[in-house]
Amino acid sequence: MKRFQTSNIPDNARGATVAIGNFDGVHLGHQAVIDVARAQAIKTKSPLGILTFEPHPRSFFTKKFNKDLAPFRLLNADARAHRLEKLGIDLVLELPFNEELSELSDWEFSKQILNDGFGLSHVVVGADFCFGNGRLGTAASLSEHAATLGFGLTITDLKNHDAQVISSTNIRKALSAADPRRAAAMLGHWHRLEGAVEHGEKRGRELGYPTANISIDGLQPPAFGVYAVLVDVLTGPDAGSYHGATSIGVRPMFGENRPNCETFIFDFCGDLYGETISVGLVSYLRGEETFHGLDALITQMDADCIRARNILKSL
């Protein structure tokens, strides 16, 4: 997979069939759009691509108007690219979302970016697609632009789960409600937190539970608490898949206030500092608690790990 973080691409990347959107989470609705694009790419023997935006437009406008914004993204750009690579995408076009781009009208975006800039042969969007200055462009107006400019367009229907539209917003709600399985039903995969393993306070090692710590800065944190998880070590000599238990929260027992993700990997003794791991949330075990002493904490951690092992071995 080739990833371009620019509005300029080489000539051999032009003529692609692309699905357009933010693709936060790469959920089943996104995958349905991608599947339509894939079928078209196979039919026309063109590269299959994704056109997305970085930073997320919501982040850009919040910063522009000096507003506070709670972390909301499900995936950072690297994790999104990894997820898209698993779907067999040939090209990921990450269009820099800046002041200049935000001021383009929907027609200017269609002509200058889609047609003249990327030279796309076919575009696929969801029925709720909006674009251009003031989000005045719609799937219907894009259809008119495509006819005028000469590239193909397919508009896909929205996808539902349990009579609810599958959307990044509804997935965020499920994660905030401590329901990772409902989130997974809309995602089509376990919700994953991905990042490089950082040095922490090493308290877990002292307690007999050494953890791999990753930052979740910029991401919407799931409900704080302890989860049974599937862990993929993506880089380094210990690359592979493992089971584990993860604590997400601010560690109230130790006076912390920055949300963190700490994962104890079962039956593992390697060194992961600096390596990239992906933590898939499978089941919520309990909420974040403050314990009366370390012995009580260790007893609870023992119970958490036994429960997590039992849940994960049944998958």
Image: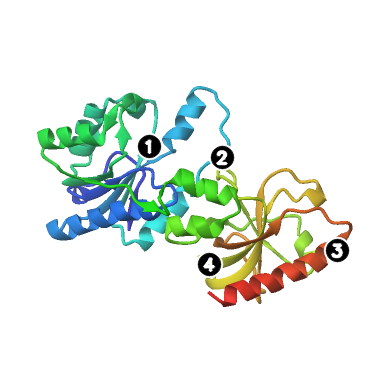
Q: Earlier in the sequence, mark 4 or mark 2?
A: 2
Looking at the rendered structure, the kind of residue marked 2 is Pro
- Tell me if mark 3 has few (under 14), some (14-19) or many (20+) residues whose alpha carbon lies within 10 angstroms of its own: few
Whole-number angstrom distance, CA of label 1 to CA of label 2: 20 Å
Q: CA distance from mark 1 to mark 4?
A: 29 Å
Residue 68 in view (yes/no): yes
Q: Amino acid at mark 3?
A: Ala
Query: Of helix, strand and loop, which one carries label 3?
Result: helix
Mark 4: amino acid: Asp
Query: Of discs 4 and 3, which sits in the foreground?
Result: 3
Q: Which residue is mark 1?
A: 96
Residue highlighted by disc 4? 232
Residue drawn at x 22%, y 38% is 114
Residue 58, horizontal then vertical, whole percent: 45, 33
In the image, residue 222 lies at what x, y percent?
59, 50
Taking the spot 59% from the left edge, 59% from the top edge, the residue there is 274
**x, y percentage for residue 252?**
78, 48
Question: Is 246 placed left or right of 32 in the picture?
Answer: right
| Amino acid carrying mark 1 in the image | Pro
Chain-order first, disc 1 or disc 3: 1
| Neighbour tally class for label 1: few under 14, some 14-19, many 20 plus, Cα within 10 Å | some
Report the Cα–Cα distance between label 4 and label 2.
24 Å
Mark 3 or mark 2: name the one nearer the start of the chain: 2
Q: Mark 3 = which residue?
A: 296
Quadrant of res 309: bottom right
Whether 209 is drawn above or below 150: the answer is: below
**What is the quadrant of residue 35 in the picture?**
bottom left
**In the visual, does 57 lie left or right of 300?**
left
Residue where numbered disc 2 is placed? 71
- Which numbered mark, 1 or 2, is in the foreground of this view? 2
Choose the circle earlier in sequence order: 1 or 2: 2
